[in-house]
DNA sequence: GGAGTTAATGAAAAAGTCATAAAAGCCATT
DNA sequence: AATGGCTTTTATGACTTTTTCATTAACTCC
């Protein structure tokens, strides 16, 4: 599998700085895009998503923090590295709270910057890898396309059904309570409407299980809730 | 033995804050789970236990203090760090009284927060280190899977039965009073309903003891309650 | 030994849970 | 206005768990 070049969006109001970074970073094999302001960054990002945004905290107009917040809202898995001016912990905290993954403080060494960019890119899944497909047995859930395949053939799911199975996939292995599921799928104000859940469990089982009466995937955990996954093994990762 | 990542449950009603913390904390290598309310926290925790709960004191519905109290009741060894809004000593005191291990006051520095989390995690035994499979004779209780095995074969227990035997396992050796058991299993408002206890003791003995009439494990301690464990020897530790 | 209590037993009523089925409501599209 | 897909409600039966009740056995204290 050939990995596509990683895309970095530089957001800074100083043209000179952008130019310098573009040169250095593209020399390292990154694909570089630029924006002169927070507003432009949001535009550019909306049009063509990047893997990582390098964002100056100090910009006229829509500030760095606010831009960061909005980018993060747009894409929970985007890598965001902020450039803070001083070493005030305040800026750092605000940056992290706004959803940044990391930051460098100006003045920084280019080496350090690259190290941090690489670290974040490693952690953050890049677009290419990001078509998030989770597998379990002969099931395959694609969170981006919102599709589920069983034995490679697509199973049509309604929105609610999809949310439900997605929650299961993301909590596979462990038991999840009824209330947890209800709140996750129907919203925080739900919790007691067990019937909804039962109805949907039945529909899901009908679609997923070879024999709905003897489920392989969607196991019931009496008096507690359900459990997704065929093994009882206690292991997993994000 | 590879130590599993430590699990932190963030409980806060502000989505932005949760997200920010999730990003920052998982970047530090923690495994992060979220809950939007006290109720949800109890659900999530009930289904899959965390090592530490970071709990906002100020939440609608079941407040932070009450949530803390209940979490503490569920798990005496859980780490709980509360986030109090102002520096009022009142909040701090109430938090500690409710069973919190530590607290940070908003606004806090991220660095400080992490330092406190780490300190509490160091002190509190993490799940990995905790003995989660308890043994006694040929019995084996798994607190995670909520299963009991006798001579390696699983014994099916109802929720109440499980709670009861779990309490015994965790207080093995010593005598436990009727009221203690009732309150632990049925809730604080119980205490006099001896019949419940008797009924359940009978069922447990039926399932566990070779000869229910001459119990090896679940011994009765006349006028006091019961005692779990086969040796009368005066030794043990938690 | 007898009165009074506490514990174990047996059995069954009451309450709750889960799976299933199907009707009713909602909503966008035709 | 009718259709079709999806969601919400309601109903039912099988089954498990919890609670309650009645009876018998065991023990303590006088």
Image: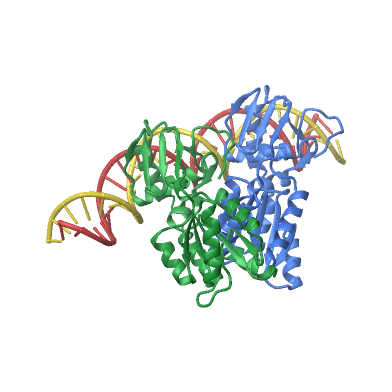
Chain colours: A green, B blue, C red, D yellow
In the picture, residue A156 is in which quadrant? top left
Task: Give left or right: position of A200 versus B12.
Answer: left
Where residue A12 appears, x then y in whole percent? 53, 69
Residue B106 visible to the viewer: no
Residue B109 visible to the viewer: yes
The one nearer the camera, B35 or D15, is B35
The quadrant of the rendering that contains the N terminus of chain B is top right
Q: Residue at x 40, y 43 (%)?
A: A201
Q: In the rendered view, tell whether residue A216 sits above or below residue B88.
A: above
The quadrant of the rendering that contains the C terminus of chain B is top right
Task: Give left or right: position of D23 versus A207.
Answer: right
In the picture, residue B16 is in which quadrant? bottom right
The one nearer the camera, B115 or A87, is A87
Q: Residue at x 55, y 65 (%)?
A: A55
Where residue C5 appears, x then y in whole percent? 75, 42
Q: Residue at x 41, y 39 (%)?
A: A140
The one nearer the camera, D22 or B68, is B68
Task: Give left or right: position of B121 versus C14.
Answer: right
The one nearer the camera, A190 or B176, is A190
The extreme bottom residue here reads A61
Where residue B219 appears, x then y in whole percent? 75, 31
Q: In the rendered view, tell whether residue B35 sits above or below residue A2.
A: below
Q: How many marks?
A: 0
């Amino acid at each position: 599998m050939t990995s596509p070049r990683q895309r970095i969006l530089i957001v800074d109001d100083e043209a000179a700085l952008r130019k310098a970074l573009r040169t250095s970073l593209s020399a390292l094999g990154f694909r570089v895009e630029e924006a002169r302001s927070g507003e432009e960054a949001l535009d550019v990002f909306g049009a063509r998503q990047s893997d990582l945004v390098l964002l100056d905290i100090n910009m006229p107009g829509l500030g760095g923090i606010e831009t960061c917040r909005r980018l993060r809202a747009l894409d929970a898995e985007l890598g965001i590295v902020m450039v803070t001016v001083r070493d005030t912990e305040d800026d750092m905290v605000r940056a992290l709270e706004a959803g940044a993954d990391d930051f460098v403080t100006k003045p920084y060494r280019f080496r350090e910057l690259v190290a941090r960019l690489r670290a974040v890119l490693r952690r953050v899944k890049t677009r290419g890898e990001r078509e998030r497909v989770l597998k379990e047995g002969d099931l395959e859930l694609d969170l981006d396309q919102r599709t589920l395949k069983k034995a490679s053939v697509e199973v049509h799911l309604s929105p609610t059904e999809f949310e439900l199975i997605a929650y299961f996939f993301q909590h596979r292995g462990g038991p999840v309570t009824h209330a947890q599921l209800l709140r996750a799928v129907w919203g925080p104000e739900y919790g007691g409407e067990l019937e909804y859940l039962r109805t949907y469990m039945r529909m899901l089982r009908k679609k997923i299980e070879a024999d709905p009466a003897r489920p392989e995937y969607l196991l019931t955990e009496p008096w507690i809730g359900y459990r997704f996954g065929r093994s009882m093994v206690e292991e997993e990762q994000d």
